[in-house]
Image (cartoon, rainbow, N blue to C red):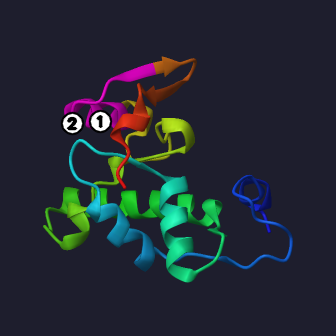
């Protein structure tokens, strides 16, 4: 499994059951994150794993699906369809340790702008950005 390295960091051992998530399980979690709060892919995986009564879910698949959802949200927003999809605040989902996602629509600069518009302070870490004190913004 391509994400075994990250799964092993969550305590998963060879032979342990894990779940390969689908977008229909990710979207409800993403939509619950209120303005001023953030969540990481790790927390999303933990929630999904808990729902399936397994140790973890594939963070690689989860990250790919979140990126796909973000792109779909932007397409709906640009098209001004005002669908439920366009209301998903994908920018509140961070990578591990509070890092911004360069693969979101508009890249790092757009992700940074969206978070700053919601009151987050963003710090530069070389070519990457991180939410300062991101732990205090985590949504349960």
Magenta segment range? 110-123
Give the Cα separation between the discs numbered 2 and 1.
5 Å
Q: Position of residue 122 (x, y in %)?
A: 37, 24
Q: Position of residue 50 (x, y in %)?
A: 53, 73
Q: Which residue is mark 2?
A: 118
Residue situated in front as seen by the camera: 70 or 33: 33
Taking the spot 64% from the left edge, 68% from the top edge, the residue there is 56
Residue 108, image quadrant: top left
The image shows residue 15, relative to residue 94, as above or below, that is: below
Q: Which residue is mark 1?
A: 115
Residue situated in front as seen by the camera: 69 or 42: 42
Taking the spot 35% from the left edge, 46% from the top edge, the residue there is 38
Q: What SS does tag 2 mark? A: loop
Residue 76, image quadrant: bottom left
Instruction: In the rendered structure, find residue 80 and report the number of the disc placed on it.
Output: none
Q: Residue furthest right?
A: 14
Residue situated in front as seen by the camera: 61 or 137: 137
How packed is label 2: few (under 14 Cα within 10 Å), some, or many (20 or more)?
Answer: few
Taking the spot 20% from the left edge, 33% from the top edge, the residue there is 117
Would residue 129 appear left or right of 92 to someone viewing this image?
A: right
Q: Are marks 2 and 1 in contact (CB under 8 Å)?
A: yes
């Amino acid at each position: 499994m391509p994400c075994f390295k990250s799964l092993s960091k969550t305590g998963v051992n060879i032979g342990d059951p894990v779940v390969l998530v689908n977008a229909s399980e990710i979207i409800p979690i993403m939509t619950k994150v209120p303005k001023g709060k953030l969540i990481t892919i790790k927390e999303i995986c933990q929630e999904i794993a808990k729902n399936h009564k397994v140790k973890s879910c594939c963070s690689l698949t989860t990250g790919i699906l979140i990126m796909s959802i973000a792109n779909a949200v932007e397409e709906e927003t640009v098209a001004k369809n005002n669908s439920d999809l366009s209301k998903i605040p994908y920018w509140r989902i961070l990578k591990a340790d509070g890092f911004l996602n360069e693969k979101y629509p508009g890249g790092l600069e757009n992700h940074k702008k969206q978070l700053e518009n919601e009151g987050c302070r963003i710090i530069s870490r070389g070519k990457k950005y991180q939410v300062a004190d991101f732990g205090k913004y985590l949504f349960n």
